Image (tube, coloured by chain):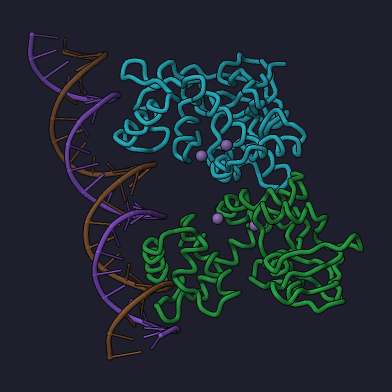
Chain colours: A cyan, B green, C brown, D purple
DNA sequence: GTTGTAAATTAGGTAAAACTAATTATGTAT
DNA sequence: ATACATAATTAGTTTTACCTAATTTACAAC
């Protein structure tokens, strides 16, 4: 049962939203895909018809088992291609998302496996996100947000939750990348902003919006 | 002016047909794309509107300069991806065409150049077809059909004109590949079939349909 | 020059995936 | 309980890229 480009994007989005929110509402999907709610309900009915999701207004959208397998397959391909673009073609990590967004939809039975082998079976993509294995299993890794750190706690950057170009550009400018050592010097009560050091350089102040999107491996 | 997947396929097809036939008729395009003539005329008008081709029933379709640049860009990407699939992912040469058919439509300013560099700036794809440079220039190479050879003439296989899976499988079975040395032992007048040796092995008889699709470098 | 066939063209229609503009349902605040 | 705001849904429309079924044009054979 082959899926269209658009169906694949919906499944992927529902999967991602399901990880953070307890209910995947029609509105949330519409926002994530920047589509009109009227378009979204059409597609949700189509996916329901194909038994890739269940949907009703109170429960929201939930992937069925085949739906989740399909979503993980797209995510796997997306992240493998990102590794390829960065490791082999020398792209910067902030340039690859929109290309992987296209490459993830290439259909071929053997492609993901061959690409995976060629890349040396990487476990994480250039943003630190885990690459699902072909059986859908995810490696576990960085999981604590910088925003949840206490004063004086240290950790190593393992992943970023926002992969938009502006955010990644901002991190580059801060000299912050995967593997950077972070220490929290201070935490301001009134807006949750933090003063941190990155690899022991001069202290910098960062907003809660920033610290919420950095995941670390605790020391 | 970005192009759709479908527009790109039409431009590519018109380019290829223009190399072999003097007039690219609507019918020829319809056959090549396995589309209905009524669909083809719609698209030809759209491409004409965008000034990527000229078209009228007597002249047929002709690429304008921007149209040819676009076509060569798709062909370049197609052939570079085929090299990648064969050289890096270990696909066989008969498996890659339909994947390249998808990959050629990935849009990114830097991608073709980065891929080209990564592959070591190859001049020919796995089927021996020349890869246009970014300026549209084609390397020249194998150009004589086996069907045009005389008795006792020899040559080296440099390219195949038909890249369909059945044809390539047939060649594999004959033990014929790029670089194979061919000698013509006999040519049958009544159906133009030939008796040849491949790398000096036992003589084999091949049809004119086959010899028409093999291009050689003459010794 | 009539006739037959193939090629080109017209007219109208469909499916996918989006949209806008109402309308209805739901939940929260007063 | 009422009112307001937000979410969900309906109805109808658009664009792209196809289609089928006529119809018209071109051209070759006789
Ligand atoms: Mn990404
Ligand atoms: Mn996508
Ligand atoms: Mn090919
Ligand atoms: Mn194509």
Residue B210, visible in the rendered structure: yes
**Picture residue at 64% right of the left edge, 39% below the top:** A82
Who's the residue at 76% across and 61% down the image? Answer: B122
Q: In the image, is residue B39 above or below residue A203?
A: below
Nearest the viewer among B166 and A17 is B166
Residue A98 located left or right of residue A25: right
Report whether C3 appears left or right of A99. left
User: In the picture, residue A196 is in which quadrant?
Assistant: top right
Quarter assignment of residue B83? bottom right
Seen at 45% across and 81% down, the residue is: B59
The relative height of residue B218 versus residue A45 in the rendered view (above or below) is: below
Question: Is A90 on the left-hand or right-hand side of D25?
Answer: right
Residue sitting at 43 percent across and 20 percent down? A62
Q: In the image, residue A36 lies at what x, y percent? A: 32, 37
- Residue A128 x, y percent position in the rendering: 65, 29
Residue placed most toward the observer, B22 or B206: B206
User: In this figure, what is the number of numbered marks?
Assistant: 0
Q: Nearer the viewer, residue A75 or B184?
A: B184
Q: Which image quadrant is residue A118 in?
A: top right
Q: What percent of the width, then of the height, locates residue B170?
A: 73, 54
- Quadrant for the C terminus of chain A in the image: top right
User: In the displayed structure, would residue B202 be above or below residue B51?
Assistant: above
The answer to whether residue B140 shows anywhere in this view is no
Position of A38 with respect to C5 (left or right) is left
Query: Residue A147, percent across and down?
Result: 55, 20
**Residue lying furthest right:** B200
């Amino acid at each position: 049962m082959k899926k269209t480009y658009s169906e694949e994007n919906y499944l992927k989005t529902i999967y991602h939203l399901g990880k953070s929110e307890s209910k995947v509402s029609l509105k949330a999907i519409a926002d994530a895909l920047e589509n009109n709610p009227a378009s979204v309900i059409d597609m949700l009915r189509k996916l329901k018809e194909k038994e890739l999701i269940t949907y009703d207004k109170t429960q929201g959208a939930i992937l069925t088992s085949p739906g989740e397998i399909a979503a993980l397959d797209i995510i796997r391909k997306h992240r493998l291609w990102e590794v390829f673009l960065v490791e082999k073609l020398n792209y910067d990590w902030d340039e690859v998302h929109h290309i992987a967004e296209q490459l993830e939809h290439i259909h071929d039975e053997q492609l993901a496996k061959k690409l995976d082998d060629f890349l040396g079976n990487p476990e994480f993509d250039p943003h630190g996100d885990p690459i699902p294995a072909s059986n859908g299993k995810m490696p576990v890794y960085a999981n604590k947000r910088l925003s949840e750190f206490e004063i004086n706690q240290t950790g190593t950057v393992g992943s970023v939750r926002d992969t938009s170009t502006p955010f990644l550009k901002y991190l580059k400018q801060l000299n912050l990348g995967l593997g950077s050592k972070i220490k929290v010097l201070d935490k301001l009560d009134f807006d949750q902003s933090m003063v941190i050091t990155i690899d022991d350089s001069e202290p910098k102040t960062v907003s809660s919006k920033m610290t919420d999107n950095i995941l670390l491996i605790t020391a």
